[in-house]
Image: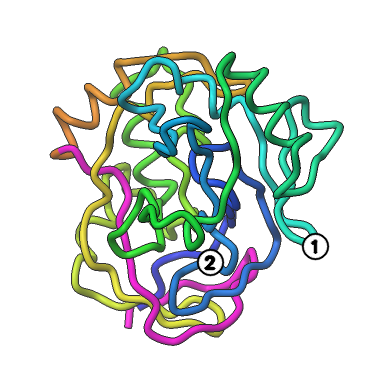
Amino acid sequence: MQFGTTRELWRYPVSSLTGEQLETVELDDAGVAGDRKWGLFDAESNVVAAPETERRWRPVPGLRARAAADGPEISGDGDTWHSLPSPTADTIASGHLEFPVRFQPFGETGASPRYVRDPLHILTTSSLARLRALLPAALIDVRRFRPNILVDTDTDDVDFVEQRLIGRRLRIGETLVEITEPCSRCAFTALQQPGIPFDKDVLHTIARHGGGGFGVLAKVVTPGRITCGDTVIVD
């Protein structure tokens, strides 16, 4: 059964930073290749950034991350980019947050990635439409919710339709993924980001109407390539 088509594809090279929108992504066993492999850490305590729980980390989404040929890069303004790891990148982030921090790959710190459940996050245009209907005055931007894949659904159903697919498999491009659970939401969805204002009502509305979940998590069954416009089929 055809479910929709891929409308947007996203990768977040550094956890909690704003990510990059792509035309094509490669899925491996751990999700989108290069996704959330790095973290931003307190330079003194080595605690990873947690914008959803600690006020001092709230400005983190104002930093941007992208993948380059030689590894991830970060930017404070979207114009000038700095390679990781580097003292310059750490200095930029420390100035942005007003306390000393450093970028490190999760595999080198002994710290676990912030998202230890199934790593692929899928959201639909139907769910976005449902949330906009519930909150007509809010800015419901896909960037608030940080999906890897935004699916443009084939129906006009304004509902949290992907939650009906828990336990089902989707064929997307060359890949096969299995939907495992709703994506539980935290205060990150309310945070200010570039071009997106702080809005606590977004999280409250999801909690009231979506059971706390918005979008779904999935695991990769068959790795491969996904491109914008690929058909999404419920297997």
When the figure is inspected, residue 28 is found, relative to residue 96, above or below; the finding is below
Q: In the rendered view, would you say 221 is above or below 118?
A: below
- Label ID, residue 32: 2
Instruction: From the viewer's side, name the closer residue of 118 and 121.
Output: 118
Residue at image point 22% right, 53% down? 182
Q: Looking at the image, which is closer to me, 181 or 125?
A: 181
Q: Quadrant of residue 61?
A: top right
Depth order, front residue of 203/151: 203
**Does the magenta portion include 224?**
yes
Please state, as top left, top right, bottom left or bottom right, where the C terminus lies in the image: bottom left
Q: Which residues are magenta?
A: 212-235
Disc 2, SS? strand
- Counting residues from the start of the chain, the first of labels 2 and 1 encountered is 2
In the image, what residue type sits under mark 1?
Asp
The amino acid beneath tag 2 is Val
The N terminus: image quadrant: bottom left
Q: Camera-side residue: 183 or 152? A: 183
Left or right: where does residue 99 sit relative to residue 168?
Answer: right
- Categorize mark 2 by other alpha carbons within 10 Å: few (<14), some (14-19), many (20+): many
> Mark 2 and 1 residues: CB-CB less than 8 Å, in contact?
no
The residue positioned farthest toward the front in the image shown? 44
- Image coordinates for residue 57, horizontal then vertical, percent: 45, 23
The percent coordinates of residue 93 (x first, y second) are 65, 28
Quadrant housing residue 19: top right
Q: Which mark identifies residue 26?
A: none
What residue is shown at x 27% (from left), y 53% (from top)? Answer: 161
In the rendered image, residue 13 lying in the magenta stretch gets the answer no
Kindly identify which numbered label has been placed on residue 70.
Answer: 1
Secondary structure of the residue carrying numbered label 1 = loop
